[in-house]
Image (cartoon, coloured by chain):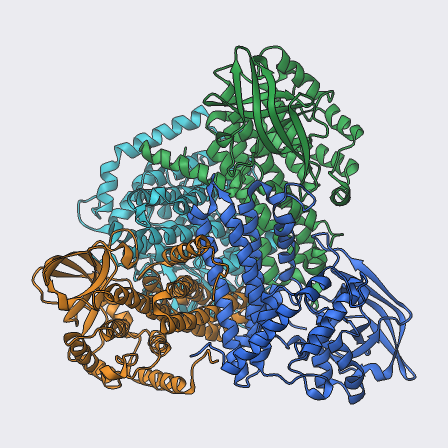
Chain colours: A cyan, B blue, C orange, D green
Amino acid sequence: MDLSFSEQDEAYRQKLRDWIAGNKDLATRTMKGIDDKGDRNPIQAMRDWQRHLYEAGYVGMSWPKAYGGYECSLTEQVIVNEELARAHLPPTINTIGLTIVAPTLIQHGNEDQKKEHLKRILRGDDIWCQGFSEPGAGSDLASLRTAAVVEDDQFVVTGQKVWTSVGPIADRCVLLVRTDKDAPKREGITYLLVDMKSEGITVQPLRNAGGGSHFSEVFFDEVKVPRGNMVGELHGGWAIARSTLDNERSGLSGVVALENNFKKLLELVEAGTRSGKPALEDPQTLNQIAQYWIEIEGLRYLGYRTLSEQLKGQKPGPQASVGKLFSSKLRQAMAKSALEIAGPYAALTKKSPHVLNRGRWVAGFFDSLGYSIGGGTSEIMHNVIAERVLELPRSVED
Amino acid sequence: MDLSFSEQDEAYRQKLRDWIAGNKDLATRTMKGIDDKGDRNPIQAMRDWQRHLYEAGYVGMSWPKAYGGYECSLTEQVIVNEELARAHLPPTINTIGLTIVAPTLIQHGNEDQKKEHLKRILRGDDIWCQGFSEPGAGSDLASLRTAAVVEDDQFVVTGQKVWTSVGPIADRCVLLVRTDKDAPKREGITYLLVDMKSEGITVQPLRNAGGGSHFSEVFFDEVKVPRGNMVGELHGGWAIARSTLDNERSGLSGVVALENNFKKLLELVEAGTRSGKPALEDPQTLNQIAQYWIEIEGLRYLGYRTLSEQLKGQKPGPQASVGKLFSSKLRQAMAKSALEIAGPYAALTKKSPHVLNRGRWVAGFFDSLGYSIGGGTSEIMHNVIAERVLELPRSVED
Amino acid sequence: MEFQFSSDQLAIRDAVAKFLSEEWDLSERRRALDDGPVKVSDALWQQVVDMGWIGIAVSEDKGGSGLELLTSAMLVEEAAQVLFPSRLCSALASAYALDQCGGDSMPKLLGSHMTGQHFVSLAMDEANGDYGPENNSTRATMSGDEGVISGQKILVPDADVADHFLVASRLGDKGVLIKVAADAPGLTITPMERIDAQCVSELELKDVAFSTEDILGDADEAEAVLQRTYEFWTTLISADLLGVTTTALQMTNAYAKERHQFNRPIGSFQAVSHRLADVKMDEEVGRSLLYGACLALQERPDESSPQVSAAKAWLSDAATRATEAALQLHGGIGYTWELDVHLLLRQARSNAVYLGDADYHRKRIGAYLAEQLKSSAAGVSN
Amino acid sequence: MEFQFSSDQLAIRDAVAKFLSEEWDLSERRRALDDGPVKVSDALWQQVVDMGWIGIAVSEDKGGSGLELLTSAMLVEEAAQVLFPSRLCSALASAYALDQCGGDSMPKLLGSHMTGQHFVSLAMDEANGDYGPENNSTRATMSGDEGVISGQKILVPDADVADHFLVASRLGDKGVLIKVAADAPGLTITPMERIDAQCVSELELKDVAFSTEDILGDADEAEAVLQRTYEFWTTLISADLLGVTTTALQMTNAYAKERHQFNRPIGSFQAVSHRLADVKMDEEVGRSLLYGACLALQERPDESSPQVSAAKAWLSDAATRATEAALQLHGGIGYTWELDVHLLLRQARSNAVYLGDADYHRKRIGAYLAEQLKSSAAGVSN
């Protein structure tokens, strides 16, 4: 057993750290929304940031060189994930393009589609959004009803999608549509690539429970999509979408995020009081904090185990749902503890002059509640573990 | 709102207390297993005890006078339940006869059956056991397979029952048998009264996880039961059994038992240590103890609410399952806390010279685990609350 | 024996529910999250006053209806079910405090508070890292019949409409409530924004003057008046938490019957139905504890702390669980701004840490149990 | 990077599993509950010894196999899956302790311990109301090269076969392990009956004599030897808890597929399947933490406490939850004597409070985190 990195890997890490150190100003400028031209244009600034990261070799690391990737080792990818998360750098804006669209195109797209889109995804030239969920089709995704009629050499799409991140700024969209109403629900779905500038598309921001608008609703009114934008076969979209849903990551970068969260919580404990005494002297608080530390350690080592398997060439299985389920629970518990420690100040908004840490904890609490819903509810994750890991009979029939 | 008892009720309570005080010797003798004749015969001693209680007016309180009951008010019944539980008197041995068989006969029996059995149940002359559960029919009770064939004027019963309390000492048994294999499962069940001395009955003690043998298995091999021992109609037994399952009590005597348990736990806390300090100074322990106190208070007031409704003539509904589910959880939590406070001694058997309180806590722990299984598992209780209180659609189809 | 609502109470409850459903729109709370604290319009408040709600527990000789305290809790629970603002709670709590005072000025103030001419609010919570009046650090000092108060109070409700505050302060070795005018020199009021959009403020008191007659209760009663008022107000907050719990359960239960996924109503999945059954259990136990607290307050107000704390601790947890379950079981739609679930959650979380969180109230019970043990009392309760 | 079993380790694991399934019948444990502590027969123990299990982690120059500590944990986990007695744990732990000693006599004792001629056990837990060697109150005093130990140890394993005990004692301001012969004058051994029928005893030491060379480790190493041995033994107990968790999950999972109620396998009800999913999560996290503890022990034994405590705290809770879920989900049949579920539960509960319960180990981590904060270390871990 060995968690150490090779000398070569450590050298790679050092090079990356040097790059990060050398680009602090760029990162700061990006976070202020200043783009390469020096204009205040937050979206463009984020596109520029992704392009710089890509050009430095830190985006598309696992992709084939033929499509602009770097074919790096898995260890190098882990190093990059860890270091970027630790350094609190701006994220890549085109997350959906990078983690959902590109792997799908690499696996299922035709040569034209790969050539047209992959490089642009890497460089942040096109920002992608995802049109899967619908108001009536949440956990039961396959019951979606947005319909596409085939007319000559194009699809005509009408319907509504919801929970679409980056909707208002997206250039393109991966869309699931129903092309055969009479087939069993999984056999009448087609996977399309849609230009968001097409006529008939309306994007409406969707406010969430915390008051933010990270998501949007997207309405399609007889939107025309060329037949060449279909991925895979007609009516064959479900299996393609499913393969992307399975495309889970080792989760180690998620652990770094939790660790950063935990550090903030520790600072709160250090400064806070319980029962009129320093919270750090309260056995109950310490017990709880220790439990979170344990759970983050557990997730980290779980990540290492998954990574070890991947290094041996095994595909990460549905075990990844264990990490998803566990970390959303942990995230919620930590957010709640923070509010408890904040005491009577716990219930203030970020607009209040008295709020702690500029509302980070309240915002974090509302965010944490979304983690057990988005990307598969905790109930669905339980089903996945039960059915696909434990191989229990299905509790949900279609 | 008023929890006080009327003067008349308080006088009744005083009379009862006087009776208890005047019968301390009798209670002690009973607990030592000495019967009325002065012989050591624990079973007979318990029968005698029940008869004395009955003759004093404290058994069969709600029953019609025509069948030997006293037709007392509900408040008087509550007073008796509370006082008997507080005084740690021996229980009535014929619990199943009193709480399951008699209410069934009063509601569904014919006049002959009532005359033959009710008075004997009250006096403890006949001890009854219950033959409902089977190895293959636990939560799904209606799938039972013990079969009875009708031959002339009798049933011939063959099959096996399990989880039968007081099996080895019972005189009679209420038995559910399948009389029609082809009917839907709830429509082919018949309710019989069986003499346990009948030929073909074998009773085998069943050891539980804690090592005790409170239960037994009962085997029926072509046991002949006269047709006159059928309650209600042929194939009509399920509804009869179901009505008894619903016959829940207000649960206030259960609260007294939990309170007694809690007092013992407090004594343990008073004597115990956590982290090398008196457990009473450990905030975590106090927090937990406070929570149990809260929950017992909650159950007690819940009991008062149910009682108030009953006093107004409303039937206690499936809400009683709330009490069952809640108290089994509480019982388990308290047993676990006791073990935690017992620290390294927590894992010793009652045979060990070092065990705390003569093994009460370990035994209590194993007992507590049975509470969420026996009399309807907690899973079934959740179903009952969901389906019958919240009126949600059924999760279990037959 | 009667441990439930009387038929009179049920009639009041139905009337209250009907009135609120007609006159109050809970989506007002959503708007207030953007546009500042939620308010009851003057006209609506006058209706509330005219119906006699504020004096419902005030003794009859002081112009109230003299109904038992359970009725007040029932009122608050109904109001919370539709997220009517907390102003009702503070109005009832300050009426309760004033009702315990003799003399001339307090009954007079109570009278005008009940008719809506004045509004009296209360200031108890502090930012000193602990809860409860016994831990207050606001200090009053006196010389002769005159004195000054200094300190800081937080989460003081309804400063937008209050012309007086009853301020919990230490005076010598006692805790007391002292009446302070909203425009008193030395008093600074700063709004705080609570996540449920209720109007709460910080009061900064710098040598704010008062005289003997501003202290609620006679010398030998003043500490009890503070403590009882704290217990009563806390119980009303518990009632508020119960109301929120009830609505969360009802909303989610209805949704679970109606929403279909995988060709079945989601309420037929045990992951949903069993969690709702747990919420139902939480609610039933919470309701029972609330009635217990009301009864204790009614019958032995100075020994009611354990029952009051039991209700507050349980309902703080229960309302949090119920509203989180509501959000989770509604799935994506429950996480939207437009659905009312987050409004319930915001109120539950705000009140869960108001006037003592669950841990504080369990600590009070723990201290009570330890005390019981020390005095080697045989009985745990009763 | 490799954070899982190597192919060599997998081969060992399979061989161990095969051997145990052929040679050990876990229902022996049920019999022992009635007839006294469970024993490994001399013949079977000799086989275990002959396969080299005891020296698996002992350095090669002392006659062991020198395999990494994870291998020992793997061995214990496999043994626990079939409820093989704890004797394997104590044998491995005392071998680990002896392996760290130079000189002449300890390596010699280690040699005969590894070949089965002698059996060395360990005595750590005490009845003083707290856990951990730092809280031990057994005292050793010396004058010159000779000394005496007095104190009381509880839950000492395998006194039926041990001819020596390594006794954790305070010597001056240090904690040390001191070797004591089972027949030493002043030592009284009383059996204790544990609910899982394992052989444990109380040791009463009254001025039991020892000399310098009975102390494990040189003067500057002795305290570290005690602490490391405690960490290692604790980790083995964690491995035992993991094995029990795994078996409980496997048994219940199999039953949930096979048992039908309401015309469906019970595993298709979410009340069953989601609880099993939680147990699976518990197990996966526990396994990860155990590997982390092994790695920490291997690479930095004197700084391994946080990782060791993380595994023990988590697995104490996880094994309890897993075995209770097993009992509940098996329903009535799970509550019978004849089913193995209660045997697993008994072992889980026994080991959950052995060498520190979950709260004690979280307390250690809490102290570590507070220390980290004090030394204003920027990094939380790594």
Query: Image point 66% across, 79% down: which residue?
Result: B57
Query: Image point 24% across, 65% down: which residue?
Result: C220
Using the image as rendered, state which of residue A153 and residue B316 is in the foreground: B316
Using the image as rendered, state which of residue B256 and residue B207 is in the foreground: B256
| Residue C55 spot, x, y in % from top left | 26, 80
The C terminus of chain B lies in which quarter of the figure? bottom right
Q: Is residue A385 visible?
A: no
Tell whether D26 sits left or right of A94.
Answer: right
Q: Is residue C300 above or below residue A10?
A: below
The N terminus of chain B lies in which quarter of the figure? bottom left
Query: Image point 59% across, 25% down: which residue?
Result: D167
| Residue C299 spot, x, y in % from top left | 38, 73
Tell whether A216 sits left or right of D306.
Answer: left
| Residue B27 spot, x, y in % from top left | 69, 65
Q: Is residue D18 above or below residue B207?
A: above
Q: Quadrant of residue B119?
A: bottom right
Residue placed furthest toward the left: C185
Q: Quadrant of residue D371?
A: top left
| Residue C57 spot, x, y in % from top left | 30, 79
Residue placed furthest toward the front: B22
Using the image as rendered, state which of residue D293 and residue C319 is in the foreground: C319
Q: Is residue A313 visible?
A: yes
Count of numbered tags: 0
